[in-house]
Amino acid sequence: MMNVKDFWYVVAESRELKKKDQVLARKVMGEWLAVFRDENGEVVIMQDRCKHRAAQLSRGKVCHGQLQCPYHGWVYDKEGQVVAVPSEGDNFKQTKSRRGHTFLACEKDDYIYVCLSESGETKEEPFVMRHYKEKGWNTIRLINRFDNNVTNCVENFIDIPHTVYVHPGIFRNPRKQQIDVDVQRIDGAVKASYLNETDNFGWFSKLLNSEGSGISHTDEFFMPNVSCVEYIFGPKRHFIITSQSIPLENDETLVYTDLTYNYGIWNKLAAPIIRWQGQAIIDQDIDALANQMEVIKKYGSDFSNTSNDVIHVWVESIQKEIEEGRDPRLLPERNKRTTMLV
C-alpha cells in the first residue's frame, strides 16, 4: 500500500530557521504546521493547533527548544507533550491526552522536509539535489506559488511543446524542428531523453551553446512531485533545473526550484542572468497554469492526448496508482520513441 502522505515534502529552507527562537507557520496538503527547532537545533514539526483552545501554535514563541501557545501559555516539548500549564502552576500533571500531534521531520541539502504519514513511517528518502554545494557548481533557489495541482505543475515543467508558445524568444522559438524522444516509465519515474537538440534556447543560446554542438537533454519525473530537467552542452556547460512541487491544497502548489549549473569561469557572471531568465520563465508558466485550472474548474480535466503526450500519460498513470493506494513501482516498465516538432 502507498499513500501520497508517505513521501517527504519541503516546508522551508534551513536558513529560515537560523535562530532557535523562531517558529514558522506552514501548510502541506491542507495540514497546518508549526515548524521550530528543539534545544539541540533539530527540527520539530507539529500540527499548528493547541490542544487547549485551538489557537495556532505558530503564533507563539520558542523558549529553550519548547513551543509556548500564545493564547494561554501552554508549553509543548519536541515530542508534542504538554509540559507546563501556567494557570495550574505547581499543580500541573502531564497526561497522554495533553499531547499535540507531531510529524516526521528531517533536513537535507538546506531544505526542511515533513512527512505526514499517518503511520509515522516513510519508506522513501528526500530527493537528493544533484551537485548541490559541490565544487565548481552554483545553485540559485526560487520559490513560487502556482494556482494548479501538483500533477499539472510537474507535467508543465517537463513539457517541451508549450515552450515555443508560452516562452517565445526567452526560451525557444517556433521552428518546426524535429526532435526524437525516447520515453521510459520505470520504478515510479518517467524519463524522456531528447536525441537531436542543438540550439533554440532563445537569446541565452550564445552563452549555453555558442558553437551549436550536440547536447544531452533529459527530462525526468520522480513520484510524486519532483521534476528534473538536465542539459549538458559540453565541458563546463551543465545546467539542471530541479523543481519540488508541494501541495498546499488541491489547486494550490508551492514550487521550490533549484537552478544548478557549472559554467566554469562564467559561474559568477552567469548568476544574475540565470536568476532573471529562470524567474521570467516561471512567471509565464504561473499565468498559463492558472488559466488551465480556471478552465478545468469550469469544464473538467478530460484531456485529449496525442503520441507526443506519452510523458504526461505515464506521469498521470503513476499519480493514479498512488491516489488509489497502490505502489507505482509495480507498474510494468514501458518504453516508447516519439517525434515532435518545436
Image (cartoon, rainbow, N blue to C red):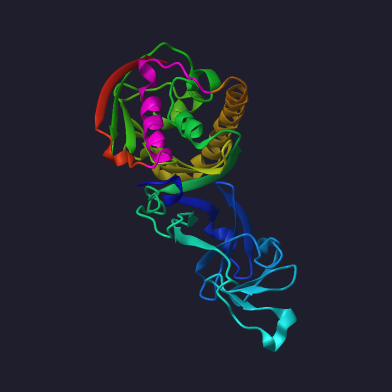
Q: Position of residue 186 (x, y in %)?
A: 27, 36
Which residues are drawn in magenta?
Answer: 301-325
Residue 84, quarter of picture: bottom right
Residue drawn at point x = 68 percent, y = 78 percent: 85
Q: Position of residue 267 (x, y in %)?
A: 45, 44
Quadrant for the C terminus in the image: top left
Position of 272 with respect to 134 (left or right) is right
Q: Position of residue 327 (x, y in %)?
A: 33, 42
Tell me if residue 241 can be seen: no
Residue drawn at point x = 44 percent, y = 41 percent: 225
Residue drawn at point x = 45 percent, y = 54 percent: 117
Q: Is 314 inside the magenta-drawn segment?
A: yes
Q: Position of residue 161 (x, y in %)?
A: 45, 19
For the view shown, which residue lies furthest in the bottom direction? Answer: 90
Tell me if residue 151 can be seen: yes
Above or below 258: residue 312: above
